[in-house]
Amino acid sequence: MSLATAARLLFRHPPRVRTLASSSSRASPPHRARFLNGRRIAAVGLASGALYGASLFAPPAILHADGDKPDGVVSQRTQSRSDLPLSALIRTYVVYSLCSIPALVDWSPTILSTLLAVPGVKQITETVVRYTFFNQFVGGDSAEEALPVLEQLRAENKGVLFVYSVEVDEQAPGSAKPMPLSAHKQIVDETLHCLDVAADFEDKHASANGGKGTWVAIKLSAMVPDAEALRRLSKYLVDTRPATTPRIAFPGCPRASDLDILSARTPTGSLTEADIAALRELREDLHTICERARARGIRITVDAEHSWYQPAIDAFTLDMMRTFNKLPTPAKRSWFGSRRSEEASTTGVQPLIYNTYQGYLRRTPEYLAQSIADARAEGYALGVKLVRGAYHPHEIEVHKAATASRMEATTPSGTHELSISPDNMPPVWLSKDETDTCYDTSVKALIALIREDVDKCAKGAPGPAIGALFGTHNWDSANLVVDELVKQGLASTDPSGSVWISDAAMQRVAVAQLYGMSDALTDHLVGRTRSTSPFVLKYLPYGSLREVMPYLSRRAIENKSVLGNGGAASERRRAASQIMARLSGQS
Ligand SMILES: Cc1cc2nc3c(=O)[nH]c(=O)nc-3n(C[C@H](O)[C@H](O)[C@H](O)COP(=O)(O)OP(=O)(O)OC[C@H]3O[C@@H](n4cnc5c(N)ncnc54)[C@H](O)[C@@H]3O)c2cc1C
């Protein structure tokens, strides 16, 4: 079975209610399927233990499992990889070897359920997973334990998008136990702690230009007792939002009035009283998180999830941006005709809050344009994290099921119920080329906008009024970001070919990859650029092994496009050649 098939298996049933077995507000598979998914990875780990026992006791370290670089691309920075202990290289080889054996992944649930039936094997399984997948993709069991990883990354001029990675599992209808009410509050509390650890780290590593290389990511569906409340709010918003011109495809575009419903005293539409209470509490919790972020000067990104949660997620994120990204009023002309800059009077980091835009959504071009217009009209800074999007196969599957159920009115309950889209077309593009074009066009538009913003601020406008974080493992898109910065005069190339990113651009732009993945690209970007604070970040999750198991499962699903299609094999070959070089004394 390929990783893509694994993804389809995992997302076969619709989610309903969650327990804090784990994570992901993603509408994902029912509890059992997800648990099997976690077990699948564990089983893969177990098999790896048998095959590669030598790697099991490798210490946690920063991994550089590089994929092959495209022709003509030469990384200027290989130092960090050659510093790795041999044991870490072997572990990298093990993890990517396992990811590239479809049959092993395919059979792992069976292997696992057999092994788990043997007393004492559970502990062995956990040990194997810890020393393989956990150490590859996760920073540590706690924020403090992840600090050595932050330190080492910073020593390589890499920043971190730090995230407490507990997500919430969803279960099939009727099979769920209610989630302990305090579980989502614990996630909120840990997020506040995550912010403090990030800020303390930044205080210690303050850069000359005040740039901060540690950001914090949050996932809204993990912060409510039941993610269905977000889906029901989304449905309500889709049904009641005022239309925009031009029309924006599902999941639409948030409006300032979206959260007015939270003041309602009686249940409205399919929203229950409990939903309204939970969503009100979420809004308060988010404001507490944003206040802490503002006080400590740490940027927040809000993860994008499945399209049926997005209207609600966008509404809350807009609410946060309107409050916490607010810019001072424009500077007035002085008596002497010159403009008084108010940029200096802007306290803290701007933009503070970033929403995530998924390039695979059809709505993205119009949505981005509308977001820019809204931010300008209302005087707040727009924070954009641009990714391609992680849930393409599931979005297509749910749309197909919904279309089929519309045609056959008798379809029993199932996947189609997740869809809340009124559109006939699926919310996502059907071809990879369309997603690529959408992503790259957005990159160009955002960087052109950043150029404009730098010019406006130089003339006294308050700002920065726009910021962009480009999350991608795609070499062409990542290089496009750097090329566009040069083209727009926000960076310059020296005779050696190094690209110097200006401080004005550094305030507004960063690039990121997931920790444990595409380190060749990360190193290439760090090597190609020069900056006074980290321009390239790694998305670094932390949490206990049990908590992050769903995140580990998700790495196989969300990144099958990266690890699949030969990606895992490339990463494995890269690790193998480094091991050989090390053993033969060449590095
Ligand atoms: C720092 C960071 C943060 C992230 N945060 C989020 C997040 O908040 N929400 C989220 O959803 N994802 C998030 N991701 C995951 C991101 O969406 C995946 O990395 C991305 O899907 C992989 O795309 P790529 O740009 O790396 O490159 P590529 O490998 O070039 O692109 C693969 C992507 O193309 C798209 N695609 C593939 N086939 C098709 C097709 N037939 N039709 C249309 N499109 C297709 C899919 O989006 C697929 O994932 C994040 C990634 C990073 C690095």
Image (cartoon, rainbow, N blue to C red):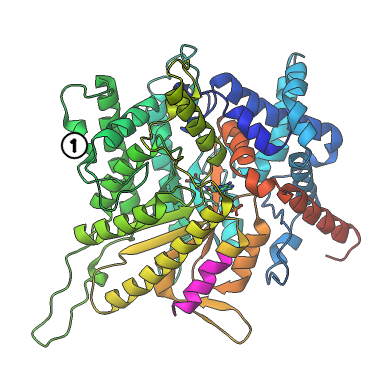
Residue 248 drawn above or below residue 133: below
All told, the count of numbered labels is: 1
How would you classify the magenta stretch by its main secondary structure? helix
For label 1, the SS is helix
Residue 397 vs residue 569: left or right? left
- Give the vertical position of 561 relative to 175 (above or below): below
Residue type at numbered disc 1: Asp
Give the residue at x 28% y 21%: 274
**Is residue 480 depicted above or below 380 in this figure?**
below
- Residue at 61% x, 44% y: name it: 559
Q: Is residue 448 left or right of residue 582?
A: left
For the C terminus, the quadrant is: bottom right
Q: Residue furthest right?
A: 584
What residue is disc 1 on? Answer: 260
Q: Residue furthest top?
A: 174
Dot 1 crowding, Cα within 10 Å, few <14, some 14–19, many 20+? few
**Residue placed most toward the observer, 149 or 454:** 454
Q: Residue furthest left?
A: 335
Measured as percent of width and height from the top left, residue 3 is found at: 68, 38
**Is residue 531 something that shows in the picture?**
no
Is residue 237 visible to the viewer in this orientation of the structure?
A: yes
Residue at the spot x=45%, y=15% of the render? 410
Q: Which residues are magenta?
A: 478-490
The image quadrant of residue 407 is: top left
